[in-house]
Image (cartoon, grey):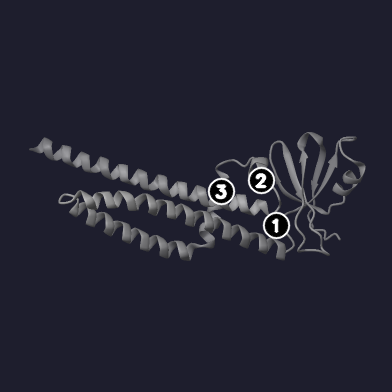
Amino acid sequence: MKKKKMYSEQKVKAKNLSETASFLIVIFALLYTAGWSFAYHYFSHFNVGLSALELPKENYFIYSYWVVADNKGILFFGGACLSGGMWRLTYMIQQRAKQSSTQLYLFLIILPILILSLFAVSYHLGISTADRKFKIQKKNFYSSYPCIEIFITHGETPNKLTQSLTSGCYRQLIQNKDKVFVFKPIKSAPQAEISTIVIPISQVHAMRLLPIHKHCN
């Protein structure tokens, strides 16, 4: 009898562990989706794709924090309603599944639809947060991005572009191991679409980040 009880307790613990692991996997997948959506749509405002940026995958979880922080009220209310509804639905179906398999089949149909809906919401929250962050940057004339002077290796690029890059009017968007991405906001046309220049690190002789922001025409 004692062995049977221990086996039953172990079975319950294993089931709870499995359910917890499944829940955490879904949560991490939702966060990844939100972060990826944010990054994709934010950098698209600079006309840069994620494949060119080569961002580390863990960065998407950092971006997802901004999505969560920007929508914490909606997420808290939605999460509370969803958790309560899911718990109630699961409880009702577990109680009735013994009498009718129809309830179980209904649950198996509803659950994937619900999960897909969560991913759709996560994706769209990433879009709205990205658009909002970019509008703030544009309004503040991209104050979060430092001015940069880039000195190109002699003979690698046209002379006119080389002189422009050393003017200090460009901002550093992001840099990875192979490339540096810079853009030049125009003070006289703050609403103009951003054009980003991608410079291979192999062509860069030196870079200097400036302590002040230059507003160039």
Residue 55: quadrant of the picture:
top right
Give the residue displayed 72% in from the left and 60% down from the top: 143
Q: Is residue 132 left or right of residue 203?
A: left
- Amino acid, disc 1: Ser
Q: CA distance from mark 3 to mark 1?
A: 21 Å
Would you say 65 lies left or right of 154 here? left
* Nearest the eye: 121 or 133: 121
Secondary element at tag 2: loop
Q: Which mark is residue 49?
A: 2
For this view, does 75 lie left or right of residue 159?
left
Left or right, residue 213 beside residue 56:
right
Single out the residue that lies furthest toward the left. Answer: 1
Label 3, label 2: how many angstroms apart (C-alpha)? 12 Å
Of mark 3 and mark 1, the one earlier in the sequence is: 3
> Is label 3 or label 1 in front?
3
Label for residue 144? 1
Q: Looking at the figure, which quarter contains the C terminus?
A: bottom right
Q: Secondary structure at mark 3?
A: helix
Residue type at mark 3: give it. Trp
In which image quadrant can residue 49 be found?
A: top right
| Earlier sequence position, callout 1 versus callout 2 | 2
Residue at mark 3: 36
Q: Residue 52: x and y, percent?
A: 68, 41
Secondary structure type for disc 1? loop
